[in-house]
Amino acid sequence: MTVNITPLHDRVLVRRLEEKETAKGGIIIPDTAKEKPQEGEVMAVGAGKIEKDHRVPLDVKVGDRILFGKYTGNEIKIDDQEYLILREEEILAKFNRAAKAASGRK
């Protein structure tokens, strides 16, 4: 999915990843009781911030899965899809590719 928006400087556009609808015990969790997920996928990145007359590139790239704080960023809506714009410093962690592959195995 391509997005027609480019964040400026050290900002990142993130799409929240959806949480599961049921708990481990099979209980269905209603939308009103769910918290917003703190995990997302990077959809677009800025060019990086400028420090001492040169640009510092970001550590994340499009397609990375990240963790971010519960109350960080600004929510926006583009084509009926909700996104979050946050600064790179608000990103808490990045999943590496091996962790994503291992989490899918049972």
Image (cartoon, rainbow, N blue to C red):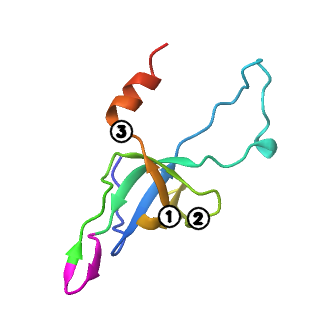
Q: Which residue is mark 1?
A: 90
Label 3: few (<14), some (14–19) or many (≥20) C-alpha neighbours in 10 Å: few
Disc 2 marks which amino acid? Answer: Thr
Residue 90 at x, y percent in the picture: 50, 64
In the picture as drawn, the residue positioned furthest to the bottom comes out as 53
Disc 3 marks which amino acid? Answer: Asn
Q: Which residue is mark 3?
A: 96
Mark found first going from the N terminus, 2 or 1: 2
Q: For the residue labelled by badge 2, is the local secondary structure a helix, a strand or a loop?
A: loop
Q: For the residue labelled by badge 3, is the local secondary structure a helix, a strand or a loop?
A: loop
Mark found first going from the N terminus, 3 or 1: 1
Residue 47 at x, y percent in the picture: 26, 70
Mark found first going from the N terminus, 2 or 3: 2
Label 2: few (<14), some (14–19) or many (≥20) C-alpha neighbours in 10 Å: some
Q: Label 3, label 1: how many angstroms apart (C-alpha)?
A: 18 Å
Q: Which residue is mark 2?
A: 72
In the displayed structure image, the side of residue 84 where residue 23 appears, left or right: right
Residue 87 at least partly seen:
no
Q: Nearer the viewer, mark 2 or mark 3?
A: 3
> Does the segment drawn in magenta span residue 52?
yes
Disc 1 marks which amino acid? Answer: Glu
> Which of the 4 image quarters holds residue 11?
bottom left
Residue 104 at x, y percent in the picture: 45, 22
In the picture as drawn, the residue positioned furthest to the front comes out as 52
Q: Are marks 2 and 1 in contact (CB under 8 Å)?
A: yes
Residue at image location 40% in from the left, 63% down from the top: 12
Label 1: few (<14), some (14–19) or many (≥20) C-alpha neighbours in 10 Å: some
